[in-house]
Amino acid sequence: MSSTTASALLFIHGAGCTGEVFSEQLRVFAGSRAPNLPGHLCAGSPASIGEFADAIAALAQRERLQNVALAGHSMGGAIALELALRRPQWLQSVVVLGGGARMRVAPAFLDGLEANFEETARTLAAGSFFANPSAERVDAAVAMMKTVGRAQTLRDFGACDAFDVLERLAEIAVPLLALTGEEDRLMPPKFASALADRVRSGRARILSGAGHFVMVERPAETNATVAAFLER
């Protein structure tokens, strides 16, 4: 696969995760990076999408990045949308993987993370993949959330619950791709369609045979779709 046209491609992970979830993408996109967000194996304890966006903006400024493409999964997609709304001069395009402009979280789920973290994390992990995921895949997702920890994972999902930029999508000026799995139960395809409908240069792509972690379950198709979008 040819390299992308962006001078910098940053993958932004989701709630309770680390940059490890993009291992299949980092192998393909030369020079791309998937930094861990503050509070995720590194210092900090952000509790809002805006604070996470500040961290990515600080990274771009510190490293003098230009012509940047952001590809965010779930909460990472919300962070990318927030940055697109700020209209940073260094931003070239945005890819939202399994995300949307509004990300409500059920109160019962937040209560479950507080009261029985590992059991709730396992339920979430099992429901984040298509059909019957292997025990190894579920265990890996649970282990990642345990590594991030209960406190930050709760802050992550609280940040998602408070995020809502649905009425501001028309302000986004950069090209946007919304890519999601057809069987995504956390952020169903209608959320991707809403992004494509409301963003001026937006488009949506739905991949069959994938759930919420579309880039893990369908890495080849995800990579090809993202590369084609960035090269246009």
Image: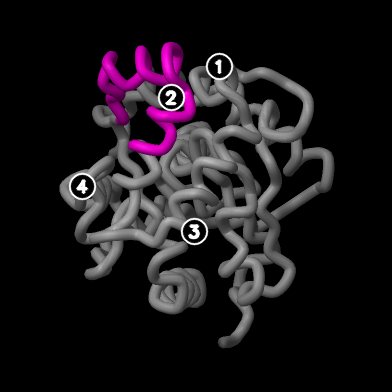
Residue drawn at x 47%, y 53% as measured from the top left: 94
The residue under label 1 is 47
Magenta stretch: give its range: 103-123
State which tag comes first along the sequence, 4 or 3: 3
State which tag comes first along the sequence, 2 or 3: 3
Quarter of the image with the N terminus in it: bottom right
- The x, y position of residue 116, in whole percent, is 43, 19
Mark 2 vs mark 3, foreground winner is: 3
- The x, y position of residue 38, in whole percent, is 69, 29
Q: Is residue 77 left or right of residue 151?
A: left
Mark 3 residue type: Glu
The residue under label 3 is 136
The residue under label 2 is 157
- Specify whether residue 197 is in view: no
The residue under label 4 is 188
State which tag comes first along the sequence, 2 or 1: 1
Determine the CA span between mark 2 and mark 1. Answer: 9 Å
Dot 3: element = helix
